[in-house]
């Protein structure tokens, strides 16, 4: 339970907290909308990448927003994207040709 009363601005609990500062909420919302507006990747794939990065970077809000990554990927494309995100979060230099090939 937050000690800060939510504002009337925003779609999620976190956004309602940021809604007290509309100059922060507006670009945050724009970034999130742009991320999920991809025509190349499905929303489900993007969500798994987001969850993977949230866990790797320790963002408690981001982890609470969607939970932990689902490692029982239904398709190889999502599995490859999550693998690439894990490597990128740990050490971008660990991304070798094989990881990139699977992600393509």
Image (cartoon, helix red, strand yellow):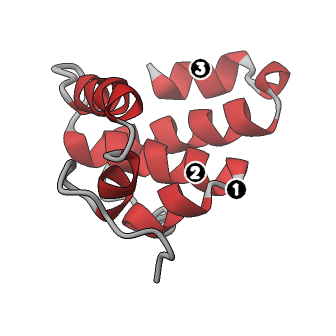
Mark number for residue 54? 2
- Distance CA(mark 3)–CA(mark 2): 21 Å
Q: Does 65 appear above or below 15?
A: below
Whole-percent x, y for residue 72 in the image: 43, 67
Mark number for residue 58? 1
Mark number for residue 95? none
Q: Is residue 86 left or right of residue 26?
A: right
Whole-percent x, y for residue 104 in the image: 44, 19
Residues 40 and 23: in front is 23
Label 3: how many Cα within 10 Å (few below 14, some 14–19, many 20+): few
Q: Does 61 appear above or below 38?
A: below
Please identify the quarter of the rendering in which residue 17 is found. Answer: bottom left
- Distance CA(mark 1)–CA(mark 3): 25 Å
Q: In the rendered image, is residue 17 in sight?
A: yes
- Distance CA(mark 1)–CA(mark 2): 6 Å
Label 2: how many Cα within 10 Å (few below 14, some 14–19, many 20+): many
Residue at point 49%, 38% (across, down) = 80
Q: Earlier in the sequence, mark 1 or mark 3?
A: 1
Determine which residue is flagged by label 3.
Answer: 100
Element under disc 1: loop
Q: Residue furthest bottom?
A: 1
Whole-percent x, y for residue 7 in the image: 27, 57
Q: Does 79 appear above or below 4?
A: above
Q: Does 47 appear above or below 14?
A: above
Q: Are marks 1 and 2 in contact (CB under 8 Å)?
A: no
């Amino acid at each position: 339970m937050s000690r800060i009363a939510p504002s009337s601005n925003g779609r999620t609990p976190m956004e309602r907290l940021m809604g007290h500062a509309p100059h922060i909420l507006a670009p945050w919302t724009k970034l999130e909308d742009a991320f999920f507006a991809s025509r190349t990747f499905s929303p489900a794939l993007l969500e798994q990448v987001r969850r993977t990065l949230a866990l790797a970077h320790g963002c408690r809000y981001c982890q609470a927003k969607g939970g932990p990554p689902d490692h029982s990927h239904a398709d190889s494309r999502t599995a490859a994207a999550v693998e690439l995100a894990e490597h990128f979060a740990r050490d971008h230099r660990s991304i070798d040709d094989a990881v990139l090939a699977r992600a393509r």
